[in-house]
Image: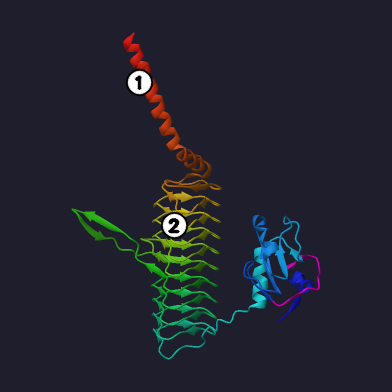
Amino acid sequence: MQKTLKEIAKLIDGRVVGNADTLITGASGIREAAEGDITFLANSKYSSLMEKTRAAAIITSSDVQGATKPIILTENPSLAFVKIISMFTPDDAGHPSGIDFTAVIGKNVSLGKNVTIGAYSVIGDNATIGDNVIIYAGCYIGHHTKIGSQTLIYPHVSIRERISIGSRVIIHSGAVIGSDGFGFATIKGAHHKIPQVGTVEIHDDVEIGANVTVDRARFDKTVIGRGTKIDNLVQIGHNVIIGEDSLIVAQVGVSGSTIVGKNAILGGQSGLVGHITLGDNVIVTAQSGVAKSVPADTMVSGYPARPYMTTQRVNASLQNLPKLFDLVKELKKKIEDLEARLDKK
């Protein structure tokens, strides 16, 4: 396939600067691009790469200046490039189709149109599977669980009983949805299990990474809001509520009964204690430990997590500790010398 820059600009609602007839035969990252490729630059601080790339053209934003190659200006280069990638490298994953003869399907299961169920998958009694759902091999769907249309479930996913999964959800391999929450009552040194009888609701357009665990609620429900994206190896505790369109990066841990607002970002390896609330648009930087509630529109970092600029000042002060230590030693010596002179007088 080949397209001119003019044709590509029309597709992404962009404006060509340079030769609009430049032919494009592929799409790639700015470092990996070959001749004939189109690439993108979303951040102007990496503009030096524009001179080094072998790409024939670049999708970028209007704040990038001085390009020597043809460019397409657009409001959101990253989103525009997603459309281009889809055009030049169509999805050829080759998802399976049909219901494998080894699949085990329970009683009173409702299957929509064009449902795929892979080899050795198990569908529990009274489950409901929507239209165009793809369930890969080796998955377990518990009884009374509901899965919305066009949801994609990769191999070896376990979705326990009475769970609700929305439409257009993607769940990657090894994820466990609806496992028991971590609840025990300790009496005379013995830990007695507290039954976890709640459920999990995964709303529409959520993506859940590999080996993510989402615990069922103790009584009510654990909720992952519409459009939220969860990276690999994340733990979501019981009764947690995650708002819409949030981003949760790898190895995050969210303790039970915590509420995270809309459009929140939890950086990699950050941890949240239980029973706190993070407002809308909160950003928690990587490896932060959040021990108390955070108001909306706030960035926090560090351990324990503080407002971002406070943490930056603390870190800057820590860098000066060796100098401060030397200064204190010097002042201590001067004081001792002064005291010695006073004693002689």
Nearer the observer: mark 1 or 2; the answer is 1
The spot of residue 225 in percent (x, y) is 51, 62
Depicted 223 relative to depicted 291: above or below: below
Is residue 144 shown above or below 257?
below
Quarter that holds the N terminus:
bottom right
Q: Which residue is mark 2?
A: 269
**Color theme of the render:** rainbow
In this rendered view, identify the residue nearer to me: 230 or 185. Answer: 230
x and y percent of residue 255 in the render? 39, 56
- Magenta residues, as a range? 12-25
**Of the residues under marks 1 and 2, which one precedes in the sequence?**
2
Q: Callout 2, which amino acid?
A: Gln
Residue 85: % across, % down: 65, 73
Q: Quadrant of residue 162?
A: bottom left
Please tell me which residue is depicted at 23% across the width and 55% down the height of the picture: 186
* Vertical side of 185 occupied by 174: above or below: below
Q: Residue furthest top?
A: 345
Q: Residue at x 41, y 27 (%)?
A: 330
Residue 84 x/y as whole percent:
68, 72
Q: Which mark is residue 336?
A: 1
